[in-house]
Amino acid sequence: MIKNTILIVVSLVTLMTTPLMSQNYTLKGNTNQINWTGYAEAGGFSQTGVITIQSSEVVMDKDGKLSGKVIIDMKSLFSESKKLTKHLKDKDFFDVKKYPIAILQFEQATNGEVAGELLLKGVTGEVRFQPKIEQKGNQLTVTGEATIDRTLYGIKYNSSSYFQDLGSYAIKNDFDIGFELVYVVE
């Protein structure tokens, strides 16, 4: 009798902590930024800034894997340098007047890696990263980093892959993004 009672209690606890169906989450209002870093080819110089997420929804399935969509407000692109911010928003880089949003759609694989398609500047490319996911009550925190090759999206400005003799003006093709996003149950 005691074994059966213990078995029932363990089964109930397991059922209570394992989702039986998928759960929808939306981005919590004050966690809507992505940090970015771009690099010069020489001298270790880098520039940093932020960009705002317009909206995002994720779904956690019954196996604990995420899928979702993130809409990025390209007009919010910001760095401490006003001149750099203006240049990044122009046609040489992200052409935010023509392409005011970027969209990431993604799914998480069994190994935890997220694979997604990023629509940036009218071009779709693949993005992969390994997020850290924490679930506490009705809140879900997704933290991660990814490296993006800007030239895959037609952004070739001062890329030594396309232009010769740039010297100290050469900019690396890859830039990094980092984020900590907090979602809540819809």
Image: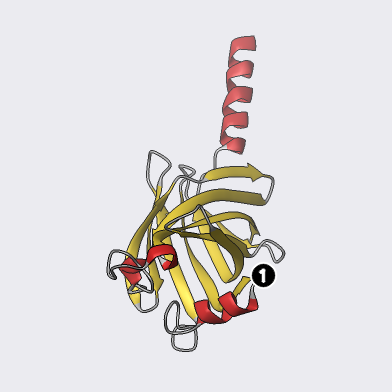
Q: Is the image coloured rainbow, by chain, by secondary structure, or in one colour?
A: secondary structure
Residue 76 in sight from this viewpoint: no
Q: Quadrant of residue 99?
A: bottom left
- Is 10 on the left-hand or right-hand side of 128? right
In the picture as drawn, the residue positioned furthest to the bottom comes out as: 97
Determine which residue is flagged by label 1: 80
In the picture as drawn, the residue positioned furthest to the top comes out as: 2
Q: Which residue is drawn at the image coordinates 63% and 17% (left, top)?
A: 6
Count of marks, rendered view? 1
Q: Quadrant of residue 25?
A: bottom right
Q: Which residue is drawn at the image coordinates 55% and 66% (left, top)?
A: 56
Residue 127 in sight from this viewpoint: yes
Quick one: SS at disc 1?
loop
In the picture as drawn, the residue positioned furthest to the right comes out as: 30
Q: Position of residue 100 (x, y in %)?
A: 50, 83
Q: Quadrant of the C terminus?
A: bottom right
Q: Quadrant of residue 185?
A: bottom right
Q: Position of residue 159 (x, y in %)?
A: 35, 67
Question: Is 161 drawn above or below residue 140 in the view shown?
Answer: below
Q: Position of residue 132 (x, y in %)?
A: 54, 43
- Is 35 on the left-hand or right-hand side of 107? right
Q: Position of residue 156 (x, y in %)?
A: 34, 72
Viewer-closest of 79 and 112: 79
Crowd band around label 1 with a 10 angstrom C-alpha radius: few (<14), some (14–19), many (20+): few
- Is 80 on the left-hand or right-hand side of 166? right
Q: Which residue is drawn at the image coordinates 57% and 27% (left, top)?
A: 11
Q: Quadrant of the N terminus?
A: top right
Viewer-closest of 184 and 105: 105
Viewer-closest of 55 and 8: 55
Which three-letter amino acid code belongs to the residue tagged 1? Glu
